[in-house]
Image (cartoon, rainbow, N blue to C red):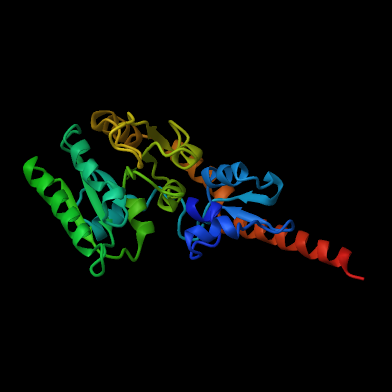
Amino acid sequence: EICNTPTALRPTPLLPFYLHRVLPYSYPADSRLVAISPGIRDNLVKAGISPELIWQRPNPVDESAYSYDRHSKNKLRAQLTSFSSEDRVILSVAKFMPRKNQVFLVECLRYLPEEFKLLLCGPMVTSGPFAQRDADYVASIERKVKEYGLHERVVIQPGFVDDVASLYKLSDVFAFPSLEDALGTPMLESIACGTPVVANYLPGVTDAWIEPGAGGFVCHSNPDPTKPGYQQSPDPQEFASCLEKASSFSEAIREQASAKILAQASTEIIDRGYWEIFESLTEKNDHQSP
């Protein structure tokens, strides 16, 4: 299973770099590779792996937890937040770290009407080499909120989220402004719950799963040649406009998008795909036995 781009091309990442030239690794001819995004699949093909050996599948979405329920929104909102049924809730669930780009959403909120509220949830590192970096990052979000006078419209909740499905269901739209991601499982879970997603453009990731006008919207960014590496943030006013439009999606659109995601990514569908791979490998071994 290939879950990120570096290991797609270097399946022995602990091997010292110089030894990769001396001892190049290749997958056995009877391998079956599982890629969690179209982008990773494309990298494998470019590296010379036959497409026939690759199964591109998303991370599975547990349909027993992540499913559409049009009647639960206001009840969950009253139980878990201070938001009212009149508010439009923008949700972001992600680890608090710079590449997740939550601070960008504070910029976007400035361009939205007063009824729009922003809920930022997710774990953060509290020890190790990145603890100070991430603490400084959360502090930068808090400074932005104060600078723009948005303290009554933004709720920041660092910490592990026990029941993320309920947060999706009480929200009107899910924001995914990440600057880099291999797949973005929350994006799939949110759509499965009937909550559309507005995301930064990540080739082979967000554009592969978000159907414009149905599952949400993808906002392209203008490349900055002085900042190589991660994608750059889109224009905050454009992103805000997409958030507003997605939050108004009809119940019918939300329900259809949920059904479409679960038809491709539910645990039942993914389990069936693994079973077919196991059966094909077993049958091949049976034919080769004396």
Q: Quadrant of the C terminus?
A: bottom right
Residue 260 lies left or right of residue 94; in this view the side is right
Residue shown at the point (88%, 69%) measured from the top left: 289
Q: Nearer the viewer, residue 37 or 42?
A: 42
Residue 88, horizontal then vertical, whole percent: 25, 41
Residue shown at the point (58%, 47%) measured from the top left: 264
Q: Nearer the viewer, residue 19 or 263?
A: 19
The vertical placement of 268 against 264, above or below, is below
Res. 4 in view: no
Residue 77 lies left or right of residue 1; in this view the side is left
Q: Nearer the viewer, residue 29 or 231?
A: 29
Residue shown at the point (28%, 34%) measured from the top left: 226
Residue 286, horizontal then vertical, whole percent: 85, 67
The vertical placement of 42 against 161, above or below, is above
Residue 126, horizontal then vertical, whole percent: 23, 68
Residue 72, horizontal then vertical, whole percent: 36, 53
Res. 218 in view: yes
Residue shown at the point (27%, 46%) measured from the top left: 101
Q: Quadrant of the N terminus?
A: bottom right
